[in-house]
């Protein structure tokens, strides 16, 4: 029985190491938990082979699994802290300036205005040519209302 326990312990260690290597290569697959459990059970089995095939083995696995799971989740939460999405809503553009990239025609949403790195559908009270600097004065849904920007002379 000792040979079986030693062989099983060695297999646990090898499989545990392989799972940890796989996790290191492909993070986020949560192979840390079973890899750690198998590695610790295998190490205990190599030192105390009689414990590996007894009722202690599942108890040790559970005692290792619970904190390992909690620590792994905490680690991945810190590693991949959530960041707010970088979306822009049209109402946040009011007061900003942009440049017409497609001619803006009153009553038509085919006109386009570039604001920063985003392009928005635009409408206006007057016709505005491509390349004209504009000020965003309002928004409706996913399009903006613009007026030509009047540049002041100093």
Image: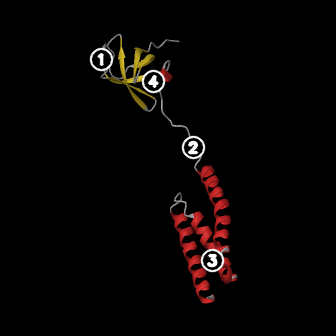
* Residue at which label 2 appears: 82
Residue 35 placement: quadrant:
bottom right
C-alpha distance separating marks 2 and 4: 24 Å
For mark 4, give the secondary structure.
helix
Q: Nearer the viewer, mark 3 or mark 4?
A: 3
C-alpha distance separating marks 1 and 3: 71 Å
Choose the circle earlier in sequence order: 1 or 4: 4
Q: Which mark is residue 90?
A: 4
Q: Residue at x 62, y 73 (%)?
A: 39
Q: Nearer the viewer, residue 43 or 101?
A: 43
Q: Quadrant of the N terminus?
A: bottom right
* Residue at which label 1 appears: 108
The percent position of residue 81, horizontal first and vertical second, equals 59, 46
Choose the circle earlier in sequence order: 3 or 4: 3
Q: Please tell me how crowded label 2 is: few (under 14), some (14-19), or many (20+) other residues with Cα within 10 Å.
A: few
* Residue at which label 3 appears: 42
């Amino acid at each position: 029985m000792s040979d079986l326990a030693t062989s099983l312990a060695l297999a646990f260690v090898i499989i545990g190491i392989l799972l940890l290597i796989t996790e290191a290569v492909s993070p986020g697959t949560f192979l840390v938990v079973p890899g750690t459990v198998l590695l610790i059970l295998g190490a205990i089995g190599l030192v105390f082979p009689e414990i590996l095939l007894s009722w202690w083995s599942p108890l040790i696995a559970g005692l290792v699994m619970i904190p390992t799971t909690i620590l792994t989740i905490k680690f991945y939460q810190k590693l991949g802290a959530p960041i707010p999405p970088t979306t822009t809503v049209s109402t946040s553009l009011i007061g900003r300036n942009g440049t017409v990239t497609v001619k803006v025609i009153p009553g038509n949403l085919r006109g386009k205005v570039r604001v920063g790195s985003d392009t928005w559908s635009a409408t206006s009270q007057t016709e505005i040519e491509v390349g004209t600097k504009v000020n965003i004065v309002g928004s409706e849904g996913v399009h903006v209302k613009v007026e030509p920007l009047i540049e002041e002379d100093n």
